[in-house]
């Protein structure tokens, strides 16, 4: 069995590494030539991923060979697709990257090959779009059993992906029964805790609703946090005693960023809108808006904190400390912390940013002012949610 | 130490029983004369409450003496108030029962007595209203240390209340420091897992947000259930695989009934509205509406199921099986199952109800038609969420 992993990003590379570690030959395909070269030289391009360094050092360029050319994966009989899916300005999924990957795989697809999609997608994407792209590009027919197609959503979390792959339950579902069985048998070789669900669609839905659970519960934490502050209650004290076996109130934040959680609710909201079931996603939409609007809540808190500084408002140096979407992960996609900094800049305030994961050049390259938390008049720590003013008033 | 428990309902009676079991003399005060007589004769008025029967049989009329007269509690030095709080038609809390209880306790309050409110209330009720009622009725001053006042929210669940009191963490918070310490020392005598929080307000908030967590998460389950049905996915299969250490998607339902969860979000919503913070409770309000509207979703499902019956729509016998708010608990307050039956009747449909906890007389006394699930054309099992048609089509 030779396995191709299409997409060597934060989700694909740990998976490719784990498969290679189990003794399989893995061809990794990625558009980023420098990344491929690094991997083949044994260098880990995702240093924040625990355990990945060892895997890449030992297997990179050997059992795990990275290439930018799909041709290099022609001899593979299993294709795992794990490329990004974004949403466009109207919050609809933008399938272009996914379509490109599937059509490229389709061109080298042979009879009886197995294709598994790992990217989190709207339900029905695998059975409809992925199938169509593969059949069109390959000339093979799924119905005649000429190839197999399944979905197995990645459940990684950057920093803990290797242990997740080794310990966390993973699911797989086929677009037809044979596809499910084939994909299950393949995955069983390298995923210890594997469960088969009744269809690819169910597997897709499972992953999407996990994200919805997180988004809604973070929105709830944010709403309760606002209420607690309004009535002068220490939210974290209350949360500590509210949480028990049957209660799991999440942590408040500046909102939800990254490639995952903020996108998934839209998959369902947009699908329901297409069906004119506008009242089937009111909670998901409310939560999404609430989380995205948290930056306005924090912007107001920061502006009001300026009253403690004896300077004209426009002169006060405001430093946003921490601009990534999550502490310790160098990723800005839909980062609300970065959005908060920009929102304050848009108001004309004197905003700097600081983040230990970014150099001065990188920060200035984004059109932001490089700041120093020790010198600014006001610092907002976007992960601790603390506003401190100079002199510690 | 002699302890009075004001209110011997589903929450108060188990608490009174547990305190009596620990060897304290308990005077229980309740407006219901028949209930008091039953308790004093050793009869348990809440048979569905596991373990309560033994407690009442052994302690009723002895260590636990029930009376309708507050005068009977005059020698007590601890007063625990655990009477119902409802909301009015505008969803504002209706404090009349609570006020009556506090003013009655106030009239027999002596210097250095301890008063603890267990009823779940909007934050600040204890420090503002309860304090005012007690001071006005007693002439004593809290500030001068003449009495102590705290909140310790009940965390019972009918059926499991005794074990909850014995095992579950319980919190207590005073309206001032001394009150917190005094109430903690009293409760420590009969509550093994007790924690002190910084104020009565925090204790109130803790309990209310637990309810909000439940309400929002049930709303989420209901929304995802509707979406799953729309796209032909078995929601329960998806839920099974979505839930793990970090995900806890709840069960779908006909909504949320009973005295607790459907009320608590309104405590916060109404408080925020009073403060003109209309956007501070959008998620709580959306969830409340979503849960309450689930009966319309089910009504439509039931009407559409009538297409399977070869009879004029108006002649089809529709049976709603299970009208209580929760399976196995004889309680109809805000029951969505009962509301569903009524909503279908309002449409002019031929609706019967059946419920093993209610006799024919009781059902007919509510203006409902007594039905038999075995004979009706269509049966909706409101706890299993199953619609079955005669002949099992």
Image: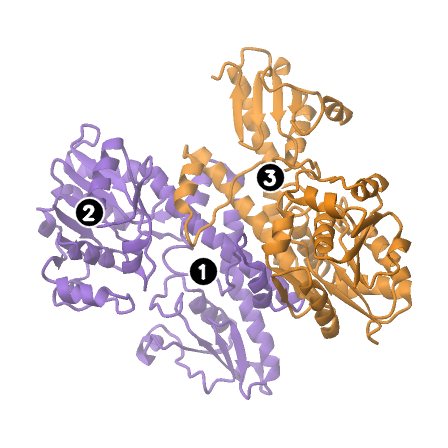
Chain colours: A orange, B purple
Q: In the image, residue B34 lies at what x, y percent?
A: 17, 66
Q: Nearer the viewer, residue A214 or B300?
A: A214
Q: CA distance from mark 3 to mark 2?
A: 44 Å
Please tell me if label 1 and label 2 are on a single chain.
Answer: yes
Q: Nearer the viewer, mark 3 or mark 1?
A: 3
Label 3 sits on a secondary structure element that is loop
Crowding at dot 3, Cα within 10 Å, few <14 / some 14-19 / many 20+, comes out as: many
Crowding at dot 1, Cα within 10 Å, few <14 / some 14-19 / many 20+, comes out as: many
**Horizontal arrangement in the rendering, residue B306 relative to residue B345 (left or right):** right
Q: Nearer the viewer, residue B148 or B87?
A: B148
Label 1 sits on a secondary structure element that is loop
Residue B256, label in figure: 1
Q: Nearer the viewer, residue B95 or B230?
A: B230
Please tell me if label 3 and label 1 are on a single chain.
Answer: no
Q: Is residue B133 visible?
A: no
Residue A255, label in figure: 3
When the figure is inspected, residue A239 is found, relative to residue A178, above or below; the finding is above
Q: CA distance from mark 1 to mark 2?
A: 35 Å
């Amino acid at each position: 069995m030779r396995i191709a992993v299409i997409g060597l990003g934060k989700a694909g590379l740990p998976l490719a590494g784990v498969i290679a570690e189990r003794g399989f030959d893995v061809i990794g395909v990625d558009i980023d030539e420098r990344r491929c070269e690094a991997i083949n030289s044994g260098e880990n391009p995702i240093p924040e991923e625990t355990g990945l360094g060892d895997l890449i050092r030992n297997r990179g360029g050997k059992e795990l060979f990275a290439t930018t050319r799909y041709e290099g994966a022609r001899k593979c009989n299993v294709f795992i697709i794990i490329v990004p899916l974004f949403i466009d300005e109207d919050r609809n999924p933008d399938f272009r990257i996914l379509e490109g990957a599937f059509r490229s795989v389709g061109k080298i697809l042979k009879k009886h090959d197995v294709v598994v999609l790992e990217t989190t997608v709207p339900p029905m994407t695998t059975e409809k779009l992925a199938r169509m792209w593969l059949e069109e590009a390959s000339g093979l027919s799924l119905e005649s059993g000429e190839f197999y197609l399944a979905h197995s959503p990645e459940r990684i979390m950057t920093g803990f992906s290797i242990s997740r792959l080794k310990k966390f339950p993973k699911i797989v579902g086929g677009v037809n029964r044979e596809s499910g069985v084939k994909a299950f048998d393949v995955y069983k070789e390298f995923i210890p805790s594997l469960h088969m669900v009744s269809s690819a669609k169910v597997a897709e839905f499972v992953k999407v609703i996990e994200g919805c659970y997180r988004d809604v519960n973070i929105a709830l934490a944010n709403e309760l946090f606002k209420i607690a502050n309004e009535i002068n209650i220490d939210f974290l004290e209350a949360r500590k005693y509210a949480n028990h076996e049957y209660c799991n109130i999440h942590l408040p934040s500046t909102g939800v960023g990254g490639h995952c959680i903020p996108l998934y609710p839209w998959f369902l909201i947009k699908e329901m809108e297409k069906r004119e079931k506008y009242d089937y996603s009111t909670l998901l939409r409310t939560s999404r808006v609430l989380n995205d609007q948290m930056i306005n809540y924090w912007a107001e808190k920061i502006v009001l904190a300026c009253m403690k500084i004896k300077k004209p408002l426009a002169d006060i140096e405001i430093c946003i400390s921490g601009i990534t979407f999550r502490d310790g992960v160098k990723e800005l996609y839909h980062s609300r912390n970065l959005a908060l900094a920009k929102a304050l800049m848009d108001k004309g305030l004197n905003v700097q940013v600081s983040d230990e994961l970014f150099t001065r050049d990188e920060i200035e390259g984004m059109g932001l002012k490089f700041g120093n938390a020790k010198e600014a008049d006001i610092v907002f720590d976007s992960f601790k949610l603390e506003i401190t003013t100079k002199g510690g008033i």
